[in-house]
Image (spheres, rainbow, N blue to C red):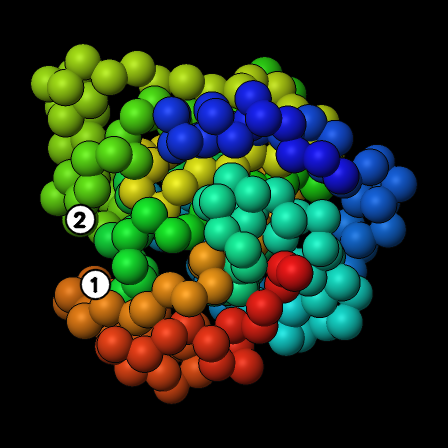
Amino acid sequence: MNVPNSAVEEFAHKGHTCIRGLATLEEIAYFRPAIEETATAGRYDHRPLEERDTYGRAFLQVHNLWQRDTTCKGFVFAKRFAHVAATLLGADGVRLYHDQSLFKEPNGGYTPWHQDQVYWPLESGKTVTMWMPLVEITAEIGSMHFVTGSHKFGNVDAGSISDESHQKITQWVSDNSLNEESYGPMQSGDATFHAGSTLHRAGPNPTSHERPVMTVIFVADGTRITEPTPLQGFDLRLWLGGKQPGELVDSPMNPLLYP
Ligand SMILES: O=C(O)CCC(=O)C(=O)O
């Protein structure tokens, strides 16, 4: 598949883009049962919604489905997705950082404004997340919202994802006169891509249906691990296969997905 130039330019300029029909409805119909089954089996938070904090109410999150199920691995390792990621990053190749399923339950809460890069002990500007719904996203639920151009500002010091990060970023966006954009309703198999520092959020799920989304986080081949901040120690231990600051991201947990 040829990645449209408009998407490459949009990603460079705005820090986000959307590619419609990246996976076909037939492909999603094939992968969705395995992803749902694996996400359900991997669920670790069994508390009812009302007993969780804001982050816990935003979605049920399960990591690295590729290591849990071979069909899920086929989805995460799809060359078509990794090719888009490499093209957007302007990289010769990309590796997997990790994948995650993000299922927003019926009546699930909002996803506060945050920046992914604050969790990642990786050189900045070298990561991109693919966010792909496995069902149609109607206007009622809505897809992700991004602050256009925010990827150029680095860490805005809003901390970890919480009501507090939401408030700080709302103020920051207003102080910097930046615009918020969303791609609106999406079909299953459409995908948004955002850079590691792009500010983003999602609305709550007021419907009686779950919002199953699969994300894959790609890192440019040749990226080095950085000294972790207090928020990044967890990721250093979990997703980099024992590699240490200064070393390349190239452990077996971070396979080359493209080329
Ligand atoms: O799906 C959501 O509600 C938020 C997803 C997100 O923050 C991400 O993929 O980085």
User: Within the image, what quadrant is residue 163 found in?
Assistant: top left
User: Within the image, what quadrant is residue 84 found in?
Assistant: top right
110 or 169, nearer to the observer? 169
100 or 198, nearer to the observer? 198
Q: Residue at x 25, y 76 (%)?
A: 246
Q: Residue 133, labelled with which disc?
A: none
122 or 8, nearer to the observer? 8
- 81 w.r.t. 206: above or below: below
Q: Where residue 24 sits in the image (x, y, percent)?
A: 82, 37
Q: Where residue 102 sits in the image (x, y, percent)?
A: 54, 49
Q: Amino acid at mark 1?
A: Leu
Label 1 to label 2: alpha-carbon separation: 8 Å
Q: Earlier in the sequence, mark 1 or mark 2?
A: 2
- 89 w.r.t. 224: above or below: above
Report helix, strand or loop for mark 2.
Answer: loop
Q: Where residue 203 sits in the image (x, y, percent)?
A: 44, 27
Quarter of the picture holding the C terminus: bottom right
Pointer 1 with pointer 2, Cβ within 8 A: yes
Q: Amino acid at mark 2?
A: Gly
Report helix, strand or loop for mark 1.
Answer: helix
Q: Residue 159, labelled with which disc?
A: 2
- 13 w.r.t. 24: above or below: above
| 78 relative position to 255: left or right | right
Q: Where residue 42 sits in the image (x, y, percent)?
A: 59, 68
| 102 relative position to 26: left or right | left
- 245 w.r.t. 201: above or below: below
Q: Residue at x 52, y 72 (%)?
A: 254
49 or 252, nearer to the observer? 252
The residue wearing badge 1 is 231
State the residue lying farthest toward the bottom: 242
